[in-house]
Image (spheres, grey):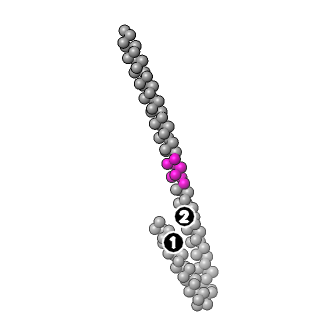
């Protein structure tokens, strides 16, 4: 977020400079400052898009992780159930002798 804040401050300063130049009727440097301002706006937009994409990816990972946990828990329950059945059979066969 620190980079975003510094970019926003730079954007604000560029806008103020452009405004001051317009106020002083000095139009020669406005196009240069405006092109810098536009590049900075694009940089901010792209960084926000990346941040949103990262959030989506993390959300997907969390979702998949929860699904994997549920599947693993179900397998563990089935294994435990089968193990208990096996132990009961083993005891039953042991008593027959």
Query: Toward which corner of the image does residue 24 lie, by quadrant?
Result: bottom right
Query: Toward which corner of the image does residue 45 lie, by quadrant?
Result: bottom right
| Residue sticking out furthest to the top | 97
Residue 59 on the magenta segment: yes
Residue 25 on the magenta segment: no
Residue 88 location (% of width, % of height): 40, 20
Q: Secondary structure at mark 1?
A: helix
Residue 32 location (% of width, % of height): 61, 79
Q: Residues within 10 Å of mark 2 (few under 14, many from 20)?
A: some
Q: Which mark is residue 41?
A: none
- Residue holding disc 2: 47
Note whether 72 is above or below 91 in the view shown: below
Is residue 8 rendered to the left or right of residue 32? left
Look at the image and tell me in which quarter the C terminus lies. top left
Residue 91 location (% of width, % of height): 38, 17
| Residue sticking out furthest to the bottom | 24
Is residue 15 rendered to the left or right of residue 73? right
Note whether 4 is above or below 34 in the view shown: above
Q: Which residues are magenta?
A: 56-63
> Relative to the observer, which residue lies in front, 37 or 86?
86
Q: Secondary structure at mark 2?
A: helix
Residue shown at 48%/70% (left/top)?
Answer: 5
Note whether 76 is above or below 52 in the view shown: above
Residue 66 location (% of width, % of height): 49, 44
Query: Toward which corner of the image does residue 44 lie, by quadrant?
Result: bottom right
- Badge 2 or badge 1: first in the primary sequence: 1
Q: Which mark is residue 7?
A: 1
Residue shown at 62%/86% (left/top)?
Answer: 28
> Relative to the observer, which residue lies in front, 36 or 17?
17
């Amino acid at each position: 977020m620190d980079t975003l804040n510094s970019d926003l401050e730079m954007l604000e300063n560029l806008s103020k400079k452009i405004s001051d130049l317009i106020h002083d009727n000095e139009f020669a440097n406005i196009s240069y400052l405006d092109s810098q301002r536009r590049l900075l706006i694009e940089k901010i937009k792209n960084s926000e898009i990346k941040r949103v994409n990262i959030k989506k990816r993390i959300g997907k990972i969390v979702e998949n992780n929860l699904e994997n946990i549920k599947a693993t828990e179900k397998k563990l329950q089935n294994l435990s159930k089968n193990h208990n059945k096996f132990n009961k059979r083993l005891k039953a066969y042991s008593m027959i002798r």
